[in-house]
Image: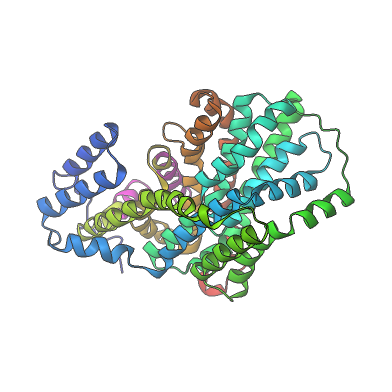
């Protein structure tokens, strides 16, 4: 248990901690891969401080990723890749477009909705941005949206990839903090839908103001029914994943495995994929997974080194020395998380910051579940915020549109998402409504 308010604990920013961190910032600025930077920082902190034996580093690297829950990550990534290759993602878009009806912002709303569908399958924001962007950016432009705005809409909608369960981010934070991923998925459902709804509402308002789109297709139950019948196989996948997890039939890892098999079987039956496609599918998913797992592996020893130096306790003491007002502390945490999300990827942010900031959240009475939801949602804002803004880079690469041009249009969506972040931070029931009282 953390000794939160021990007056002897201070956050020492001497060379044993500050030096390696400054070197890490320099390496980030030089464009060195994140996993390599984290590894160098970990080795230097352990070597200089002597907090833990350096010989434990190799063991910690493998023990950190030797977790059953992490198997879900490559499986969800592979499911999303198969979904695109089989054409099932286009069926989901047809269903979303039918549900959006004849509203003036119909296709824009459908774009955000299909991002939510994709989030229920892949658990990855970048995969959603790439998959949905290929299908919708050109059509949004044809409907009358400026191309930078169309890119910003897709980038914002794809943020739901880590916010709507199943989410790779919640799997990782659950692993780091020792919380069941199934519990986090249940808690994250309403917050994720709120974020998706805020993006839809924002697009509707902007569309009313600037008259981007004027859909002439009327709302039709028959059209919805036809789209659902045509896309019934596509709907099987999210139903299997979410239904299996929430009913308790599957763990998230088992649900990911079943989803992969289901998607592949559908593709083979419909002859939209062939056995010869498997090497490319596996290679594509392995590349994405190869980016995530090394970051996790090198982040965990760094988190252990920081814990050994009592950084979490020192951080709590430092902040509570500045103010003991819970509102100000929450605002400070949100600010730190959003700033971190702007300059670094979600995975290292989770592994490094979650153990440091959770004690502070608990000190002001916030439950660990609410903290996790607030943290992931805050980090999600960083996907459409420069200078990193991963989703901005993805849609820019797809469309050839300058990143800064997209970022200017994404500003309104940042404000919409921030509104939800504040609601989640100050209204615990939004995260805890479906959980037993023991989580409150």
Residue 322 painted magenta: yes
Q: Which residues are magenta?
A: 316-339
Q: Is residue 236 left or right of residue 183?
A: right
Instruction: Look at 25% across and 45% down and name the residue there.
Output: 36
- Whether 43 is drawn above or below 242: the answer is above
Instruction: Look at 69% across and 31% down and name the residue there.
Output: 140
Pick the front one: 134 or 190: 134
Q: Is residue 143 left or right of residue 250?
A: right
Instruction: Look at 39% across and 68% down and name the residue there.
Output: 178
Pick the front one: 297 or 306: 297
- Whether 88 is drawn above or below 24: the answer is below
Main secondary structure found in the magenta portion: helix
Q: Quadrant of the N terminus?
A: bottom left
The mark tally for this picture is 0
Could you tell me residue 305's position as x and y percent? 21, 57
The colour style of the image is: rainbow
Could you tell me residue 227's position as x and y percent? 79, 51
Q: Is residue 357 left or right of residue 132?
A: left
Could you tell me residue 207's position as x and y percent? 73, 30
Q: Can residue 198 be seen at all in this image of the molecule?
A: yes
Could you tell me residue 336's position as x and y percent? 40, 43
Tell me where residue 234 sits by quadrant: bottom right
């Amino acid at each position: 248990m953390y000794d939160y308010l021990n007056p002897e604990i201070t956050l020492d920013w001497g060379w044993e901690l500050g030096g390696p961190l400054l070197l890490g910032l320099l390496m980030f600025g030089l464009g060195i891969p994140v996993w390599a930077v984290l590894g160098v920082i970990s080795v230097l902190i352990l070597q200089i401080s002597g907090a833990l034996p350096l010989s434990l580093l190799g063991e910690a690297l493998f023990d950190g990723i030797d977790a059953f829950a992490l198997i879900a990550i490559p499986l969800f990534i592979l499911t999303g890749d198969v979904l695109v290759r089989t054409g099932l993602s286009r069926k989901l878009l047809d269903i979303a477009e039918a549900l959006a009806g004849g509203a003036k912002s119909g296709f824009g709303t459908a774009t955000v909705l299909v991002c939510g569908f994709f989030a229920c399958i892949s658990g990855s924001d970048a995969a959603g941005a790439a998959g949905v962007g290929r299908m919708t950016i050109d059509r949004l432009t044809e409907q009358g949206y400026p191309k930078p705005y169309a890119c910003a809409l897709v980038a914002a909608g794809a943020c739901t990839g880590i916010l709507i369960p199943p989410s790779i981010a919640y799997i990782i934070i659950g692993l780091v903090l020792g919380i069941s991923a199934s519990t986090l998925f249940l808690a994250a459902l309403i917050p994720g839908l709120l974020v998706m709804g805020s993006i839809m509402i924002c697009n509707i308002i902007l569309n009313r103001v600037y008259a981007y789109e004027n859909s002439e297709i009327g709302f039709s139950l028959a059209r919805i029914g036809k789209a659902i019948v045509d896309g019934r196989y596509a709907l099987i996948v999210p139903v299997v994943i979410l239904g299996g997890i929430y009913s308790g039939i599957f763990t998230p890892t088992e649900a990911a495995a079943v989803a992969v098999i289901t998607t592949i079987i559908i593709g083979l039956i419909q002859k939209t994929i062939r056995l010869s496609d498997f090497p490319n599918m596996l290679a594509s998913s392995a590349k994405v997974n190869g980016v995530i797992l090394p970051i996790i592996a090198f982040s965990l020893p760094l988190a252990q080194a920081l814990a050994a130096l009592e950084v979490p306790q020192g951080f709590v003491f430092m902040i509570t020395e500045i103010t003991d007002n819970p509102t100000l502390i929450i605002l400070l945490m949100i600010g730190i998380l959003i700033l971190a999300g702007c300059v670094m990827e979600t995975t290292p942010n989770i592994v490094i910051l979650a153990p440091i900031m959770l004690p502070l959240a608990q000190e002001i009475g916030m439950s660990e579940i609410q903290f996790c939801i607030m943290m992931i949602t805050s980090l999600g804002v960083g996907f459409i915020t420069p200078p990193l803004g991963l989703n901005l880079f993805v849609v820019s690469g797809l469309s050839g549109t300058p990143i800064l041009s997209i970022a200017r249009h994404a500003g309104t969506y940042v404000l919409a998402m921030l509104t939800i972040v504040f609601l989640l931070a100050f209204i615990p029931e939004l995260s805890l409504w479906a959980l037993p009282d023991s989580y409150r």
